[in-house]
Amino acid sequence: MSQRVFCLCLIAASILAAPATGSSQSFLSKYKGLPYHDSRYSGGPQRIPGRVLCAYYDLGGEGVAYHDKDPQNHGSGELNPADGTYLNEFRIHEGVDTSYTKFQRKPDPIDDSPFDKVVPPADLLYVGWTEPGEWFNITVDVMHAGTYAADFLYTSNRGGTISVDVNGKDATGPLEITSTFDPADPVAFRQ
């Protein structure tokens, strides 16, 4: 069963950021992905410290910028009707499952639900429906070498683990993601 995971990384100030050396230079010299850009987002590497949006994962396609187990975007174009709007069709032709937070939906609220542990910002683009083994790359511009902490805004119906790599090298090992399941929530898809 798929799970919906909001992925918004807030890099504040424990990810080690250092100049590329050794094996990381090898990764960087071979990497063919490019920082994300489109008509609304001017692109370039996202900056650390700062807010890093997972939905702005790199351009380059399957096997370069991301790996997803199927080619269908289960958010844009499936959950969200392909109606010509930016949010509903965001990255619609890519395999990574992207969507956005929706507020004030009647009769059942979606992302402004009373069952939320944390209320996310409205219209926030996110990566969701992740499965084990799926990944994506994000090019960032680290303003200075140092140790940084990352906060992740997510939902998960059963918990699990994630990890963060820096320049192709594991930087965190498995990080536990606790379940946000609430048995009192009557809306199945939020679970």
Image (cartoon, rainbow, N blue to C red):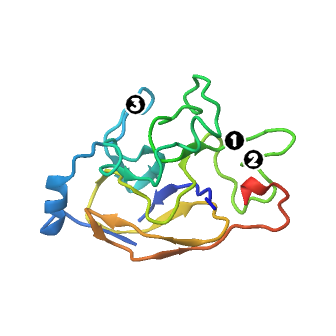
Q: Which residue is mark 2?
A: 110
Residue for point 82% across, 68% down: 183
Task: Please give the label number shown on residue 116.
Answer: none
Q: Residues within 10 Å of mark 2 (few under 14, many from 20)?
A: some
Residue for point 56% across, 52% down: 128
Q: Amino acid at mark 2?
A: Ile
User: Which numbered disc, 1 or 2, marks the residue that appears first in the sequence?
Assistant: 1
Secondary structure type for disc 3: loop
Q: Amino acid at mark 3?
A: Asp
| Quadrant occupied by the C terminus | bottom right
Residue for point 23% across, 66% down: 18
| Quadrant occupied by the N terminus | bottom right
Residue for point 47% across, 36% down: 91
Q: Quadrant of residue 173?
A: bottom left
Rounded to the nearest angstrom, the CA distance separating label 2 from label 3 is 27 Å
- What x and y, as percent, mark residue 169? 27, 69
**Furthest-top residue in this view:** 84
Residue 112 left/right relative to 48:
right
Asked whether residue 125 is in view, the answer is no
Q: Are marks 1 and 2 in contact (CB under 8 Å)?
A: yes
- What x and y, as percent, mark residue 115? 79, 59
Viewer-closest of 156 and 123:
156
Secondary structure type for disc 1: loop
Q: Which residue is mark 1?
A: 102
User: Which numbered disc, 2 or 3, marks the residue that appears first in the sequence?
Assistant: 3
Secondary structure type for disc 2: loop
- What x and y, as percent, mark residue 77? 58, 34
Q: Are marks 2 and 3 in contact (CB under 8 Å)?
A: no
- What x and y, as percent, mark residue 30? 16, 54
Rounded to the nearest angstrom, the CA distance separating label 1 from label 2 is 6 Å
Q: Are marks 3 and 1 in contact (CB under 8 Å)?
A: no
Q: Which residue is mark 3?
A: 38
